[in-house]
Amino acid sequence: MKMSNEQSLTKDVYKEFLEGQFLILWFVQEKLDVFNYISDGYEDHKPILVNNSFLFFTAQVFSRSIIVELAALFSDRNTNKSNFHKIYKAEENKNQIKPDACEKIKIILADCASDIKTIERLRDKEYSHFDFADKSGISLHFDHYDLMNKLYLVGKRILTIASTQRINPEKNFGFAFDTVKDSVESLHWLIETHSSNK
């Protein structure tokens, strides 16, 4: 179905682009909340978490998924149509945000270059193609806790700048980060209920 000229004039392509990025980051947030909850339980030696292989494996599956999604947002590749670099590189997004906001986003991404290379390597080698350095088995651990949490916060910062620093201030908008915690709250309730029934 074709859009009318009037619809195409009112359509905010840039906003839709950022909303797609927000959706990816929202999925990252939901999984990261669960991953952090389980990981923190291991660190605190909570018996129900330490002794539960299902929860441990769940955390690892979420970790792998988070890395793939963060790579989609941060990796400057044409195959990643939702990556943050397209905020200032894509032709359809040009002249949407203030020049100093563009510069801020470029600097933020440049500062994360080493972390971005790490998630690209993990995504390309280990997580997508199972090309592990140690061929004896798949390593299950919480090694990338800091990396994932850091890049999630960076993603929030980039989206906040990109949505609130537009050339036309009337088109500014915001995202409701941290408003939904359904997954981790369900897990917390399940664990607390199980613990109190013992």
Image (cartoon, grey):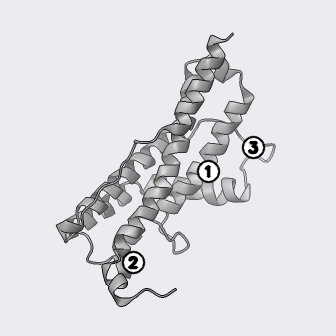
Could you tell me residue 86's position as x and y percent? 40, 71
**Would you name the residue on which mark 2 appears?**
90
The structure residue drawn at horizontal position 35% and vertical position 72%, both measured from the top left corner, is: 14
* Residue 62 versus residue 87 in the image, above or below: above
Sequence-first disc among 3 and 1: 1
Could you tell me residue 137's position as x and y percent? 79, 43
**Would you name the residue on which mark 3 appears?**
138
Q: Are marks 3 and 1 in contact (CB under 8 Å)?
A: no
Report the front residue among 9 and 28. 9
The structure residue drawn at horizontal position 57% and vertical position 32%, both measured from the top left corner, is: 186
**Would you name the residue on which mark 1 appears?**
65
Q: Are marks 3 and 2 in contact (CB under 8 Å)?
A: no
Sequence-first disc among 3 and 2: 2
The structure residue drawn at horizontal position 50% and vertical position 57%, both measured from the top left corner, is: 24
Sequence-first disc among 1 and 2: 1
SS label for mark 1: helix
Residue 189, label in figure: none
